Image (cartoon, rainbow, N blue to C red):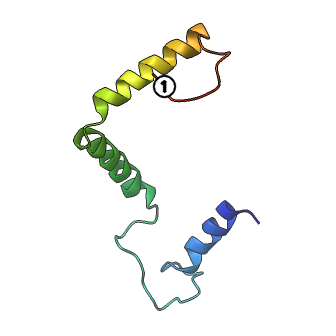
Amino acid sequence: MEGREVTFLAQFAITAAAAAVLPGADFAWFPLESTGLVSVPVGFLTGWAASRTTGSGPRSRAQYWALEERALTESGSAEPPGRVR
């Protein structure tokens, strides 16, 4: 089995579901069966807030535009890979 399959099966083993290993224990943090309803928006908002507060935005944008220009024009393709200017 791969990691994602183990994770999928393990989520039922540690929850309060009927097929849980410990059926008397309740590990639910909130009363929803699908944690994605909460974790996806929270993860998105956390990422957005971190991008706003770290201060690396202007530098990252400059590096992105330099990299995009090199990718589209293939300039510097004969040079060894290195730091984006």
Q: Residue at x 50, y 78 (%)?
A: 15
Residue 57 percent coordinates (x, y): 30, 32
Q: Amino acid at mark 1?
A: Val
Say whether residue 4 is left or right of residue 17: right
Query: Which image quarter is the C terminus in?
Result: top left
Q: Which residue is mark 1?
A: 84
Mark 1, secondary structure of its residue: loop
Residue 71 percent coordinates (x, y): 57, 16
Q: Residue at x 36, y 25 (%)?
A: 61
Q: Residue at x 42, y 25 (%)?
A: 63
Q: Residue at x 68, y 63 (%)?
A: 3
Q: Toward which corner of the image does residue 66 lie, by quadrant?
A: top left
Q: Is residue 24 above or below residue 66?
A: below
Q: Is residue 85 above or below residue 5?
A: above
Q: Is residue 18 above or below residue 53?
A: below
Nearer-the-camera pick, 5 or 77: 77
Residue 65 percent coordinates (x, y): 43, 18
| Residue at the top extreme, as displayed | 73
Nearer-the-camera pick, 41 or 31: 41
